[in-house]
Image (cartoon, rainbow, N blue to C red):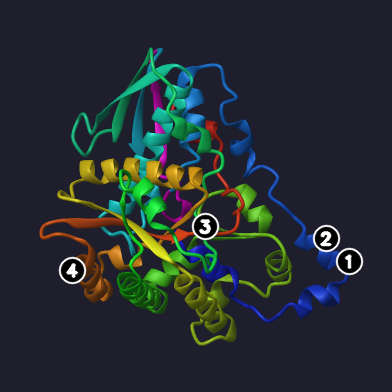
């Protein structure tokens, strides 16, 4: 999820393009998506409970913003959630673990949205095995609102440097029911090194880096047309895209000045981190990964409620050959024998982030 900021600086140092264009450059730089952010405005704006709940679910965190969910409405009060297998991340997530976690985040926000409107959403995970729907949900009246629901529209993944400000022990204690949190300076330093080394490996490995580059959406027109993947919009990025300075082909050149500046920027970002939160599981089956996703969604909402920022740094958890050493290192540090580290995130105080583009609910319904 954190590749977006790296990509945003590619071609950096070319601000002269915007200056040379004068007023036209300023107009281009001010563009915003016209339709890709509408799902945030439309959340809750339905009359039928399943659509209400789903309108909040589709705002959930998910890897590379792939939005890998398809929903089939069944009868009057039931639905099936399916995994969209066209949205898998074959290079960095070869076993689909992160995709399953994203689907778990979706389900948790669906449940919260349903409860906030007086309905339980009873889930059956992989009811027909792993080749069938990810989950079936049956909606019935009688639920109470969960306070975490109130933060769904404010939740973000903060891909910016955090303030030079510690996360206090009392805050870590508040998060203890949701995740393991480390604020110990020595342990934080070790995690910083592992996560940075993992980021470098992913960026310098052609097939894993190309996966991110292929998912770039360059400028608001591309984002509105295809509001998943890695959106690169606003400011200088719009000028660079419209003038052909920022391209997918150029972004693959790891020897370019822009790429090197991007790596320097991300080095600053990842090292401006006072604490980490992480989730482990005893099992690593798809059901376990769905459960972790539900926990991550709650953690992200709780950090929002506390005024904290959370940013997944998942590279060291990825399971491809070039990442073996960092995968081993992070597990030796954070996991007990037999456990899997499923999620790891930077934790601190960050700036407010913009909303991420989303497909409208209607585009993700299998049968209207």
Tell me, yes or no, whether the two marked residues, 3 and 2, touch with CB atoms within 8 Å.
Answer: no
The answer to which of marks 4 and 3 sits earlier in the sequence is 3
Q: Which residue is mark 2?
A: 27
Region rendered in magenta: 62-75
Give the structural element (helix, strand or loop) at label 4.
Answer: helix
**Marks 3 and 1: which is nearer the front?**
3
The residues bearing labels 4 and 1 have C-alpha atoms spaced at a distance of 55 Å
Q: Nearer the viewer, mark 4 or mark 1?
A: 4
Residue 80 location (% of width, % of height): 34, 27
- Secondary structure at badge 2 equals helix
**For marks 4 and 1 on the same chain, the one whose residue lies earlier in the sequence:** 1
Q: Residue 331 placed where, x, y %?
A: 21, 65
Looking at the rendered image, the disc whose residue lies closer to the viewer, 4 or 2, is 4
Q: Marks 3 and 1: CB-CB under 8 Å?
A: no
- State how far apart marks 3 and 1 are (Cα): 31 Å
Q: Residue at x 45, y 35 (%)?
A: 148
**Label 3: few (<14), some (14–19) or many (≥20) C-alpha neighbours in 10 Å:** many
**Residue placed under numbered mark 1 in the picture:** 23
Q: Distance between the Cα atoms at labels 4 and 2?
A: 51 Å
| Label 4 CA crowd tier, 10 Å (few <14, some 14–19, many 20+) | few
- Residue 79 is situated, as x and y percent measured from the top left of the image, at 37, 23
Q: Secondary structure at mark 3?
A: loop
Residue of label 3: 158
Instruction: Classify mark 1: helix, strand or loop.
Output: helix
Which numbered disc, 4 or 2, marks the residue that appears first in the sequence? 2
Q: Are marks 2 and 1 in contact (CB under 8 Å)?
A: yes
| Image spot of residue 310 (x, y percent) | 45, 55
The residue indicated by pointer 4 is 332
Residue under the point 27% across and 41% down: 291
């Amino acid at each position: 999820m954190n590749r977006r900021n790296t990509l945003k600086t590619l071609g950096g140092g070319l601000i002269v393009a915007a200056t040379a264009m004068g007023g036209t450059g300023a107009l281009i730089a001010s563009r915003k998506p016209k339709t890709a952010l509408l799902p945030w405005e439309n959340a809750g704006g339905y009359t039928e409970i399943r659509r209400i709940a789903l309108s909040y679910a589709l705002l959930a965190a998910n890897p590379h913003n792939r939005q890998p969910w398809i929903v089939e409405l069944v009868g009057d009060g039931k639905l099936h959630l399916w995994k969209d297998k066209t949205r898998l991340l074959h290079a960095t997530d070869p076993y689909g673990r992160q995709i399953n976690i994203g689907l778990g985040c979706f389900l948790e926000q669906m449940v919260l949205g349903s409860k906030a409107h007086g309905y339980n959403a009873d889930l059956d995970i992989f009811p027909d095995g792993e080749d069938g729907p990810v989950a079936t949900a049956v909606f019935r009246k009688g639920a109470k609102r969960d306070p975490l629901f109130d933060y769904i529209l404010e939740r973000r993944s903060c891909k910016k440097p955090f303030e030079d400000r510690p996360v206090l022990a009392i805050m870590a204690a508040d998060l203890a029911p949701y995740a393991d949190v480390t604020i110990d300076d020595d342990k934080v330093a070790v995690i910083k090194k592992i996560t940075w080394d993992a980021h470098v490996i992913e960026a310098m490995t052609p097939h894993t880096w190309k996966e991110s580059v292929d998912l770039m959406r360059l400028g608001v027109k591309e984002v509105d047309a295809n509001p998943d993947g890695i959106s690169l919009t606003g400011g200088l990025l719009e000028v660079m895209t419209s003038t052909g300075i920022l391209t997918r082909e150029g972004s693959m050149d790891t020897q370019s000045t822009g790429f090197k500046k991007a790596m320097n920027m991300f080095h600053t970002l990842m090292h401006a981190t006072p604490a980490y939160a992480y989730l482990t599981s005893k099992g690593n089956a798809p059901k376990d990964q769905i459960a972790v996703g539900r926990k991550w969604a709650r953690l992200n909402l709780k950090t929002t409620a506390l005024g904290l920022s959370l940013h997944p740094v998942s590279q060291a958890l990825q399971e491809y050959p070039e990442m073996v050493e960092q995968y081993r290192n992070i597990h030796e540090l954070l996991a007990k024998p037999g456990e899997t580290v499923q999620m790891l995130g930077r934790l601190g105080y960050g700036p407010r982030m913009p909303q991420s583009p989303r497909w409208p609910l209607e585009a993700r319904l299998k049968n209207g």
